[in-house]
Amino acid sequence: MTNRPQRTVVNLENLGSENWFESLGDEIPSFEEVCEIVGKRFVAFAFVAGVQIISIAYNQADPESSEVGFKIDDDDEVQNLSLKQFRELVSEALLSTSDLPLEIPATAEPEEIAHAIGNQYLLLAPIFGVRVIDFSFGGVELPTLTVQVDGDAEEITVQAFRNLLRDGVRATLANTRSAAPFSIDVRRIPQAETANRANNFDQTIALLGTWPGPLSLFIRTAQGQGLGTAEKGTLSHAMGLLGEAYLAKGQRETAEDVLRLGIQWGQDAISTAELFITLADARLLDESPGEAIGMLRRALTLGADKQIVLPKLARAFAKCKRFVAAAVCLDELVPNETNSQYLEDARTEVGRALGRNWNGLKDRLQSKNTGH
């Protein structure tokens, strides 16, 4: 019997990031007044992004036009923006930062683990009510974090943790752009369906673009988990439409974040298969066919149409030089019923790689299936 590799657990509760924002307030004069004008979360965003607020010229008649003076990192130059522009600046500064690949240090000290995860995320976590408990790694599973959201502890991947907080930043910014608080208006979903069919992807983004952040936080609450299957499926479908729109606009990273959120809401419903297919399309466009294979197989398991999935799966296998597997996918297709951008490419690559052996493979498979 093979022993399962052990997981290493590193406690992260004593990193000192839990109450950092409150401690910052004790050191800065007029901190409460600044938070009241700028917004507590945006003040936190500024600190995490390396932006120092120097002055605020408050306009009582039009608060959004209040002028904020600030410095960036070690630059001595004071810049000025309206309050609205400043909020967008510090939010985009956090969202535009590229994540480094997760590399686990050999010594596994908490500070080194924090650096690998991303210190900015650990600072943002308490701002959104997320408590980080520990980090687990080793064995065949991905490294995970145990976090507490809305009183409940759960284990999530590091990327899911990063996505959660990035979505929180997006939601905070989106709420300041809207005159009304965020609400889920399901009447927008048919409008987004119509927009996508017409290739009007900007309209879909305008209709649903503010939903991912709040939904990412809502799904972790008792109220969100208590929604019925139909309601969860509706939200999953909405994220599928939005992910498709972002993918069409070339915003692949955002598309993947949105689609993964939709998959969380779908919870293995058959409608989730479409999201796995769209997510696989993104991985194929990013030249990551190995990842696409797992997503397409998952879509088949959930009941997706083989005539849609198999051409993509054949293309992914061919890209990975798994030509026999690609040939099997192609041979399962019903002739003259599939129209796919991937189909001819896959056939060409498999034919070039297998040559006459392809026909021999077909004969062997047919013989096996008929029992001869």
Image (cartoon, rainbow, N blue to C red):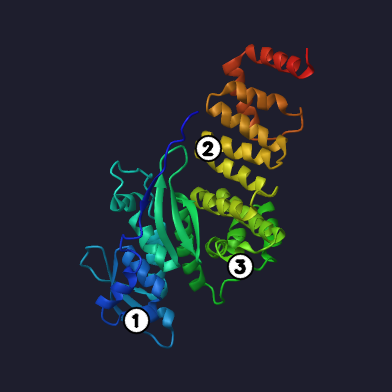
- The disc labelled 2 sits on which kind of residue? Glu
Tell me the element at label 1. helix
Q: Residue at x 68, y 14 (%)?
A: 359
**What residue is pinned by disc 3?**
223
Query: What is the quadrant of residue 90 in the picture?
Result: bottom left
| Numbered marks: total | 3
Residue 154: % across, % down: 50, 56
Query: What is the quadrant of residue 319 in the picture?
Result: top right
Q: CA distance from mark 1 to mark 2?
A: 47 Å
Residue 68: % across, % down: 33, 76
Instruction: Please report whichever mark, 3 or 2, sits nearer to the chain's N-terminal start.
Output: 3
| Left or right of 122, for residue 336 | right
**What residue is pinned by disc 1?**
32
- The disc labelled 3 sits on which kind of residue? Gln
User: Is any part of residue 195 visible from this angle?
Assistant: no
Q: Is residue 253 above or below residue 280?
A: below
Q: Is residue 173 above or below residue 274?
A: below
Q: CA distance from mark 3 to mark 2?
A: 33 Å
User: Is any part of residue 169 visible from this angle?
Assistant: yes
Q: Residue at x 37, y 59 (%)?
A: 122
